[in-house]
Image (spheres, helix red, strand yellow):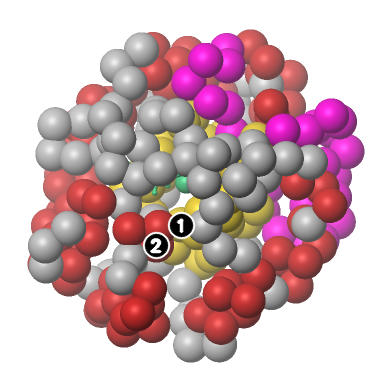
Amino acid sequence: MEYQLCPSILSADFNRLGEQIKALERAGVKWLHIDVMDGDFVPSISFGMPVIRSIRKESHLFFDVHLMVTAPERYIRDFVDCGADSVTIHAEACEDLERAIQLIRDAGAQVGISIKPATPVNDISHFLEDVDTVLIMTVQPGFGGQKYIQDCTEKIMELKELIDKEELEVNIQVDGGINDETLETVIKAGANLIVAGSYVFKGDLESNTRAIRKKIETISGEVE
Ligand code: DX5
Ligand code: ZN
């Protein structure tokens, strides 16, 4: 599997967003994690299409858009049109997950589905063949800077086992509370797409990013 650090711009300084994305690019990042919150599926509101459209003009990174939005099927086409390369929707937010997955495919983007910490892997296990990525939330979605929920490690392992058993090529992404202590745990459990907000943006962005990418490379090299 391809291992990627996916910095979450939720922790960016929005006054310097373009500049910070350039720093991530210089440090070798390929995926940019973009958290969209609607104040309904999650308590907070972040940003939406206009911001994505603006940064799309200046960046060739892979835009990984994480929709923490109720009934996200209403907006899939809009997010792809403004620059999403991958769209991740929450299983809990969709009345008809199968249809929502199809809408993302029809719009021409990669498909991600996500589950919150309390949602069992079993709820999405019959969709594995239809998606590119499963995002296991490792904190309650809604805010950056929270503590990793330890119980989620088992869910990553369970998902990894299912994917391997079915011989599928599905990315396992983790999001929330990733830092020096939890990075190794999630990679060894089976995650290959690592979202990180505060871990990347707190302090010197470019040197943090280089160091974290190096750590991911080292740890993933130890996973058979
Ligand atoms: C939380 C968002 C995350 C968040 C992660 O709901 O989905 O992407 O930015 O932030 P950290 O890495 O600081 O926990
Ligand atoms: Zn996210």
- From the top left corner, tell me how far across and down residue 29 is, in percent: 33, 66
Secondary structure at badge 1 equals strand
> Which labelled disc corresponds to residue 157?
none
Give the answer, above or below, for where 216 lies relative to 139. Answer: below
> In percent of the image, x 14 and y 31: which residue is there?
181
Q: Nearer the viewer, residue 190 or 115?
A: 115
Give the answer, above or below, for where 165 lies relative to 3. Answer: above
Determine whether, in the image, residue 168 is placed left or right of residue 146. Answer: right
Q: What amino acid is found at the position of numbered circle 1 in the picture?
A: His
Q: Quadrant of ligand 1?
A: top left
Are discs 2 and 1 less than 8 Å apart at CB?
yes
- From the top left corner, tell me how far across and down residue 184 is, in percent: 20, 31
Give the answer, above or below, for where 35 lies relative to 39. Answer: below
Determine whether, in the image, residue 158 is placed left or right of residue 126. Answer: left
Quarter of the image where the N terminus is located: top left
- From the top left corner, tell me how far across and down residue 137 is, in percent: 46, 31
Quarter of the rendering containing residue 207: bottom left
> In percent of the image, x 57 and y 12: which residue is there?
120
Callout 1: CB less than 8 Å from ligand 2:
yes
Q: Check disc 1 and report the residue beneath it.
A: 33
Instruction: Give the residues drawn in magenta, as a range.
Output: 93-120
Q: Check disc 2 and report the residue beneath it.
A: 9
Number of numbered labels in the structure image:
2
The local crowd at label 1, few if under 14, some if 14 to 19, many if 20 or more residues have their Cα within 10 Å, is many
> In percent of the image, x 74 and y 19: which residue is there?
126
Secondary structure at badge 2 equals helix
Q: Is residue 176 visible?
A: yes
Give the answer, above or below, for where 1 lies relative to 187. Answer: below
